[in-house]
Image (cartoon, grey):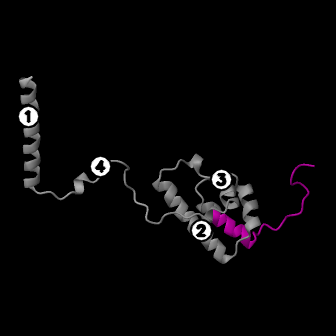
Amino acid sequence: MAKGIGRTPTNHSKTLVEQLYEQFWTAYPRKMGKKEGLRAWKMISPGEILFMTIMSALEASKHWWQLNKVATRYIPYPANWLKGEHWLNVIPSNIENKPKHNRFHNFSQRQHGPAYYAELDRLERQYLLDKLNDGEAE
């Protein structure tokens, strides 16, 4: 018998757990393994407080992934994220988007007056002259 033929219509209304999972699925950035994710979700069967905790942690994780430019392929599947209880992970809330090991990243925001740049130019010229004179002396 062909699939679905001769069957009586089933009730398509979703349970509260499935409705909450749909909200989670919509928010989750990696759309892989929806059925496996639903199975993991049903194992957890979150109530209102746990659901809010999971969604809050998901938003924090998404922000961290985006800020650190994590490629989608390195974001865990929803089922793995749920089974691993990753909503319990501690994600730093004071993340700043600064380049690492770049001493010039804040150069444009420095507040130096014209005297500073004049002195800098003078020192650079003096250094070059000294280097040139040392070369002639040899």
**Counting residues from the N terminus, which is met first, the one under dot 1 or under dot 3?**
3
Q: Is residue 89 above or below residue 72?
A: below
Q: Is residue 19 above or below residue 64?
A: below
Between label 1 and label 3, give the one nearer the viewer.
Answer: 1
The Cα atoms of the two marked residues, 2 and 3, are separated by 15 Å
Secondary structure state at the residue bearing disc 2: helix
Between label 4 and label 1, give the one nearer the viewer.
Answer: 1
**Counting residues from the N terminus, which is met first, the one under dot 2 or under dot 4?**
2
Q: Amino acid at mark 2?
A: Met
Secondary structure state at the residue bearing disc 3: loop
Where does label 3 land, which residue?
A: 77
**Counting residues from the N terminus, which is met first, the one under dot 4 or under dot 1?**
4
Residue drawn 58% across the image and 48% down it: 74
Q: Amino acid at mark 3?
A: Tyr
**Counting residues from the N terminus, which is met first, the one under dot 3 or under dot 4?**
3
Where does label 4 land, which residue?
A: 103
Between label 1 and label 2, give the one nearer the viewer.
Answer: 1
Secondary structure state at the residue bearing disc 4: loop
Where does label 1 land, which residue?
A: 130
Residue drawn 59% across the image and 62% down it: 27
For the magenta stretch, what is the residue range?
Answer: 1-24
**Counting residues from the N terminus, which is met first, the one under dot 1 or under dot 2?**
2
**Counting residues from the N terminus, which is met first, the one under dot 2 or under dot 3?**
2
**Percent x, y of residue 70:** 52, 50
